Image (cartoon, rainbow, N blue to C red):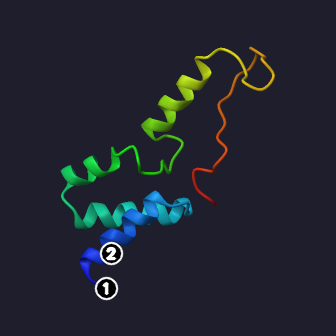
């Protein structure tokens, strides 16, 4: 497999709805094959699918949702949590 195809496939895995293990492997491939500055730019792209609950974008989204102060479904203000409809990654 040539280097360009491997890079494109790895980015596709990060964007797609793949298992967390495939996403981690794709990230390792990208880190090994691309300059670190470029990987940082690539991962800061908002179009890439967050693949980890600890992703900064996921944390920012969670804080934004909780800061509304009430449940959008029932209006409760107790024990608020943020949930997503699409899984971060299938396990």
Q: Neighbour class for label 1 at 10 Å: few (<14), some, many (≥20)?
A: few
Q: Which secondary structure, mark 2?
A: helix
Looking at the image, the residue that sits furthest to the right is 74
Counting every numbered tag in the picture gives 2
Which residue does the numbered mark 2 point to in the structure image? 6
Q: Position of residue 47 (x, y in %)?
A: 41, 48
Which residue does the numbered mark 1 point to in the structure image? 1
Q: Residue at x 63, y 59 (%)?
A: 90
Residues at badges 2 and 1 in contact (C-beta under 8 Å)?
yes
Nearer-the-camera pick, 35 or 65: 65
Q: Residue at x 27, y 48 (%)?
A: 40
- Left or right: 32 in relation to 90: left
Alpha carbon separation for disc pair 2 and 1: 7 Å
Q: Position of residue 19 (x, y in %)?
A: 56, 63
Nearer-the-camera pick, 79 or 83: 83
- Left or right: 3 in relation to 89: left
- Left or right: 84 in relation to 29: right
- Left or right: 74 in relation to 59: right
Q: Which secondary structure, mark 1?
A: loop
Vertical position of residue 23 compared to residue 68: above or below: below
Quarter-wise, where is residue 80 in the image?
top right
Instruction: Name the quadrant of the N terminus.
Output: bottom left
Q: Position of residue 42 (x, y in %)?
A: 30, 51
Q: Residue at x 63, y 51 (%)?
A: 87
Quarter-wise, where is residue 27 in the image?
bottom left
Instruction: Name the quadrant of the C terminus.
Output: bottom right
Task: Work out whether mark 2 precedes mark 1 in sequence or the reverse, and give the earlier one.
Answer: 1
């Amino acid at each position: 497999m040539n280097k360009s195809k491997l890079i494109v496939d790895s980015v596709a895995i990060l964007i797609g709805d793949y298992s967390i293990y495939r996403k981690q492997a794709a990230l390792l491939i990208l880190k090994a094959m691309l300059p670190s500055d470029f990987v940082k730019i690539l991962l800061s792209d908002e179009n890439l699918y967050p693949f980890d609950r600890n992703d900064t974008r996921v944390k920012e989204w969670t804080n934004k949702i909780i800061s509304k102060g009430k449940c959008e479904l029932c209006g409760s203000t107790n024990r608020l949590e943020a949930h997503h409809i699409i899984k971060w990654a299938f396990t």
